[in-house]
Amino acid sequence: MTHLAAYSCPKSSTNLVLVMNSGESRPRQVKTSASRGSRRVGWQVKRPGLAGPQNNGAAHPVRDLADRRSPSRRSQQISCKVYVAVPMKLSMPTTTMFSKFKSGGAAQSPLETNPIGQFFEIGKQTASAGPELVWRIHDAYRKSDGKECSVFLFEKRCAEKLHKPKRKETVTEILRSSVRQLERFRHPKILHVLHPIEECADTLAFASEPVFASLANILAHQEGSANHGGITATGASQQPAVRPTHAREYNFLDIEYKYGILQITEALSFLHYSGHVLHRNVCPASILVTKKGTWKLAGLEFTERVNDVDGVEPVPCQPWTSRLSKMAQPNLDYTAPETQTQSICSILSDMFSLGMVICAIFNHGRPLIQAGNSSSAYLKQLELLEDQVHNIMPRIPLPLQEATVRLLSKDTRQRPTAQLLTLIKYFSDPAVHALQFLDVINMKDPTQKAHFYRNTLKEALPFIPKKLWYQHVWPSLQQEMRSQEVLAAVLQPVLYLIQDSTIEEYESIILPSFRGVFSAPKTVQATVTLLENLHIILEKTPRDDIRTEVLPMLYNAFESTTIQVQSAALVAVTNVSEYLDETAIRRMILPKTKIIYEKNQSDLKIVSNVLSCVERTLDRLDKSQIIDEVLPLLYDIRLSDPQITLRVVNIYRLMLSDKKYGLSVNLMATKVMPSLLPQTVNPSLNLEQFTILLEVLQEMLDQIDRNQRNKLKLDNLSLPSPERHRPLRHQYSSDNMHVPPFNIPNLRIEQRKTSSAEDMARKNSTGGMLGGWWFGGSPSSPDSNFLRVVNAFPNRRLSDNTLMTPKIRIAPSCASSPGGTPGGGLPIRRHSSIGPQERRGSTVNLSPPTLARSMIGGSMPNTSSSVPFLLSSSMQSIRSRRPSAVLGGSQGSGLLQQLGSGMVRLTSSHQPTNGRTFSSSSVRKCPSLNITFS
């Protein structure tokens, strides 16, 4: 156990003794200070020593301490160390002093002696700026609110090498006044001072907005990286480039160059025309690049007042001289020629310096004039400046080349002013203008902010590189998200950033600040915007945050009394249904959805959102919930609007796809179809919507048909169906009627010719009815004779009925032939519709053509009927093999039926007529019948 005792000498209050066990090297903790008069005093360790009972110095305070111990412990041998402390004056906070005491008494940091440390927590140095880079820039944050910032520190001992106290004070005064000037000229393009200058005996310090580095730091890194890439000024010393310790790596994009140069130009325009001063030291060391990526003008150490009426009018000024310290003069490499040669300057002198900065930017950080703090070297290189400018032009962007040449003209009248330079085409870029507006967004009213975020910025974001999204745009959006007035508008570009960012970028950059938006109070418009785009957020948000941060906001939206929020909540459920758990859908979302519908049945937008929500969550519901809650909701919806109708039909189609949804046949027939059928004649449906509706109705009918048929089959019932008539078709067909073969004498069949369907239709239309009537083809005749074609023509196919009839050679009839009739007419046949004794003569002309008739002697009677009727009837007799013709009653059998029944007698001999005879070898043809008579 460690024993620590402190004792004051009784004769003097100036010493303090600290006692520890010998195993300890020094006291663990010392918390003591005393007040001597009006001064704060502390204690400083002077000498260690041994103390114990063996030391018999009665006057030593340790012995007094030992004597006060209990008698039992007084005789113990104690070995310990003794530290004697003497008071000293505290020049720093007590905690700081003791921290140094614990660390071995190291020298104090200059920042610890400056009062600015009371307001800021200061970190390490990151950059430098100012004349000869005398300002050391440290990262810091403000203790009061944690705001990030940068602290500029100048150590006065840096100027002690000048060996002249007056010069040292001169540099200090110049730097002190520059900070005051920065506080005076407040402008978005000029470095913003957060805390005024603080001074102590050794340092100067002030705080500003967060700074990444000065342009000189960045160009120094570029110059060290490209030793042979830049153009070196003629006459400049060729030394190996050694990268300074303050150099910082930063790769500029083209838009950053464009935007940065424009910012410095606007800062000079403000100083020239509003501040009526000229800068006189526009160089990379005076330009600071903030952590947002913006360029800010600083370094107001050498400002000069100009004519209030005309700033172009020259004013006298001090040229650069070696008699003054480099820290107390502008940078010679960027000084205008008239300043060095004529000791005059104007606002156009600053424009020359800006031109030199532009050339250094595109020349890997090397200026066109590298005088090395020599006025004579400056004048020599100035004579070759035009050649240097000509050589550097290919490196400069084309739209900026003409302006750069004019800026570097020795004739001041050729140089454009800052106001004119901002108007050149090079700076006409929507992305640059959007970034500019962000710089001054705090000066705008809420209406202007909302319009910018909702329109201008959202349209410009695709043209702004992603690097600037998180470096320049996102910090401004972070700040604006805290304001409810513009939160709805700010969410538009924020959602665009979320959508196009990677998961890593979203989780590390956006989500930490965006997380607070879910639970923070929001306007109705902001809530609606967030809910309608919730699917974009959930795609990138981790599952834990979804469950704890995002979904509670969605569930709370259903409790809102605002229709817009409720409608947006329905849209959100539709978009993010896969992220919702089934319990929430069944117990909270579905009941709330029904309540929203019941209160807003006349609002088509609400009804449409309700149906979309139901459709997306349907597969997460139980069958009982669908039957008891969803289907009654669908029955109750008025199908007046085509879009509403289509959404209802889509839900029914989804239910038809799976039996798990519980849409039964009874429900289809009694509830669903009666509600959908009237919509088939809805005139507001277009063709596509009507087709979808009919497809769903047809699918329902098909399911009803299948279900009922299966049910009836199971009940051993049959339904009227065409299948029942299939056996009858064969039973009554002429194919199954067997008759003895019948041979027609002198009948020879020749090769048939095919006929078109048009010819057959014409022949059927002209001869079908008459032939059928003539030859008794009526199906009502009980004793009608059917021609047995299959027996008479065994090689004939049923498909041949579509072809023309065969050619038939028939011998001319005569009166003496068996079965012939006097006068050469056809035999009388009995018609089934008259009595058995009644006879009806056939008047159909089967005679050869007119020439044959004149030769025969007119033995065959003339008729008014045309022969094609007979042939057409024959074809119909062949077609009568079809079941429909047999059962339905076709036309008469025709010529072949008469031939088959023996009612037409053909003779092989010829009876002479009028003394003339025909030879058996003579042949006559009838073209209309396609029959050849021999």
Image (tube, helix red, strand yellow):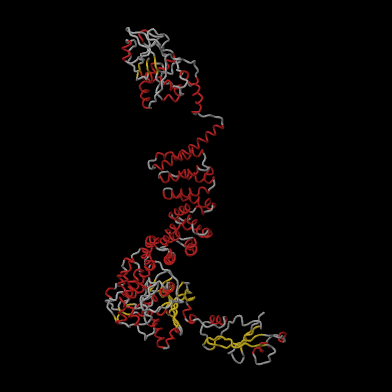
| Frontmost residue, 701 versus 50 | 50
| Frontmost residue, 675 versus 423 | 423
Eyeballing the image, is 686 above or below 716?
Answer: below
| Frontmost residue, 846 versus 89 | 846
Eyeballing the image, is 356 above or below 807?
Answer: below
Q: Quadrant of the C terminus?
A: top left
Q: Position of residue 162 (x, y in %)?
A: 42, 86
| Frontmost residue, 766 versus 93 | 766
Left or right: where 477 falls relative to 586: left
Q: Can I make out residue 480 in this image?
A: no
Q: Can I make out residue 860 in this image?
A: yes
Eyeballing the image, is 885 above or below 452?
Answer: above
The residue at 30%/70% (across/down) is 420
Residue 73 lies in what quarter of the image?
bottom right
Q: Position of residue 345 (x, y in %)?
A: 30, 79
Q: Position of residue 62 (x, y in %)?
A: 65, 88
Eyeballing the image, is 601 above or below 339?
Answer: above
Q: Position of residue 887 (x, y in %)?
A: 46, 22
The residue at 43%/42% (across/down) is 692
Q: Quadrant of the N terminus?
A: bottom right
Residue 56 lies in what quarter of the image?
bottom right
Left or right: where 629 falls relative to 252: right
The number of numbered discs placed on residues in the rendered structure image is: 0
